[in-house]
Amino acid sequence: MSRSDWNQHDWLLIHDDPQPPALHMALDQVLTDEVAAGRRAPTLRVWEWASPAVVIGRFQSLRNEVDLDAAHRHGIEVVRRISGGGAMFIEPGNTITYSIYAPLSLVEGLSFQESYALMDAWVIDALAILGIEAWYQPLNDIASAGGKIAGAAQIRHAGAVLHHVTMAYDIDAAKMLEVLRIGREKLSDKGTASAAKRVDPLRSQTGLPREAVIGSMIETFDRLHGLCHDALKPEELARARELAANKFHKHEWTAEVP
Amino acid sequence: MHGEYKMPGGKLVVVDLDVHAGQLCRVQVSGDFFLEPDRALRDINAALEGLYASSDEAALAFAIQGALAADVLMYGISPEAIAVAVRRALHEGAQA
């Protein structure tokens, strides 16, 4: 198999109504499988959140990462995603989250670092158009001079690659620090003392409403790679709902690394 | 016992474990690293289970490496980084 180019694929856009956290986790698994099986064309999915969440990485310890009492107190659902990486604190209006589901050929032969750089390139362009000079910061961040803007995670599964990114549009840092346990070791080579200072959200950097930032990002993707509007197929949604109920809502999955 | 290590330019590796009769038990490796396929985490935990608490970093890393299937991919983590986190957990436990 030789490597394919973005423009060799017909990209589809899914930008649905707000959905609950566990359904988002399930949709990532289902749509990655669909692209792997060749039943779905490569897709960009922009997420809308129906409720707040902490999303922990595949290999993170639930009790080490999350103060479950604080999460419960704030009505925040804790879910585990299928990809590695770190915990994200999500409030519906505060983050911009998207997933790219692509055939493995797009990253064929690339190292992890090269494939993160490739998958993040379009959003670096989109941020430049919004007046933000940003760059891919290995291993899996997007950063600007002001601090971290976004975190990415990638998983290669069967014949497809999933690359999903959460960008900070705005942040309630005090609440985040109540809910997430962010240890000193984690910050040891970041050169900053406070976790809140590590993030520089898009709202303050662009002065634009969240919807306008998303609109501009979609325009940039369309201009670079082409993009046609699409929607979830009924069978995709049905499968995702089943997975949300039987896997991502289950304590055994969320606490799989206790 | 609990140990953490962030390898320079890498991700955080966390190890929680107990020691029983001089051997590691209930070993749980976790962190914000990337590991494919995901079942490799179980193999890593299993490789550490039962090792002597006196094992040095090289011996721990060797045991982990030996348990990894040929298709395992690591990003932001290595057998050596896990070994450091294990030693830190044991060291902290010894001081407690």
Image (spheres, coloured by chain):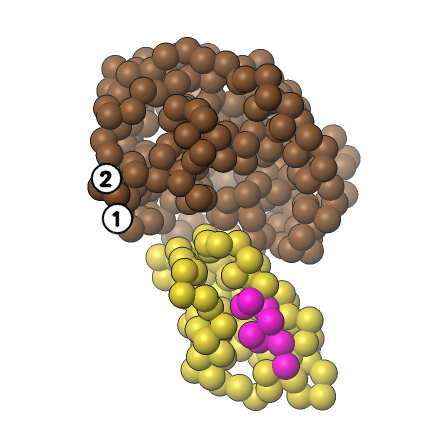
Magenta stretch: includes residue B94? no
Taking A170 as reference, is A21 left or right?
Answer: right
Task: Tell me the colour chain A is drawn in.
Answer: brown
Q: Is residue A258 visible?
A: yes
Establish if B3 lies above or below A93: below
Taking A253 as reference, is B70 left or right?
Answer: left
Q: Which residues are magenta?
A: B43-50
Location of mark 2 (residue):
A3
Label 1 marks a residue whose chain is A
Taking A190 as reference, is A253 left or right?
Answer: right
Q: Residue at x 68, y 30 (%)?
A: A242
Contact, CB < 8 Å: mark 1 with mark 2?
A: yes
Label 2 marks a residue whose chain is A
Q: Which chain is yellow?
A: B
Location of mark 1 (residue):
A109
Q: Residue at x 54, y 32 (%)?
A: A30
